[in-house]
Image (spheres, rainbow, N blue to C red):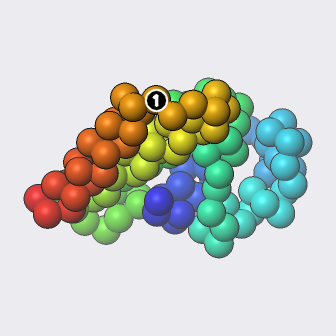
Amino acid sequence: MDNKILGNRIKESIKEMGITQEEFAKSIGTSRTMISKWIRGDRNMSLTSLKKVAQASGKPIQFFFEIDKTDKDNGGDKKDNIQNDIFEIELIKKEIELLKTKYDTKIENIETLIDNLNLRIDLIGKG
């Protein structure tokens, strides 16, 4: 996950909401320091935290991974699009793992889905 892009998106969302980092942090149950670390790209974010940020800001999770001219000098190229696809696949994998843990099941279909996602990552990386 590209923490700089994610950080830019969090900062943009907070600014659009017209609130402080402190107020935003309280709304999602974390500290202003943690928000600041995410914005700077100094700290990785859990999927649970990302969901809270997305929900509080009223943005879809994909918004936090989109690349535009403000994020990259080249305005986003094929490589950036591939990275976005990989990020989305990684998020799906994390959600599947959370479901497996939550329901304590070993469903063959879930295992197959994870294998297919890993294969897609490999193919995208080679493309």
| Residue 2: % across, % down | 46, 63
Q: Is residue 66 left or right of residue 16?
A: left
Q: Quadrant of residue 49?
A: top right
Q: Is residue 61 visible?
A: no
Residue in the picture at 22% in, 58% down:
122
Position of residue 63 relative to residue 7, above or below, is above
Residue in the picture at 43% in, 49% down:
90
Q: Is residue 7 visible?
A: yes
Amino acid type for the residue under numbered disc 1: Ile
- For label 1, the SS is loop
Q: Residue furthest bottom?
A: 42
Position of residue 47 relative to residue 104, above or below, is below
Q: Is residue 74 left or right of residue 123?
A: right
| Residue 74: % across, % down | 25, 65
Residue closest to the eye, 16 or 108? 108
| Residue 26: % across, % down | 88, 42
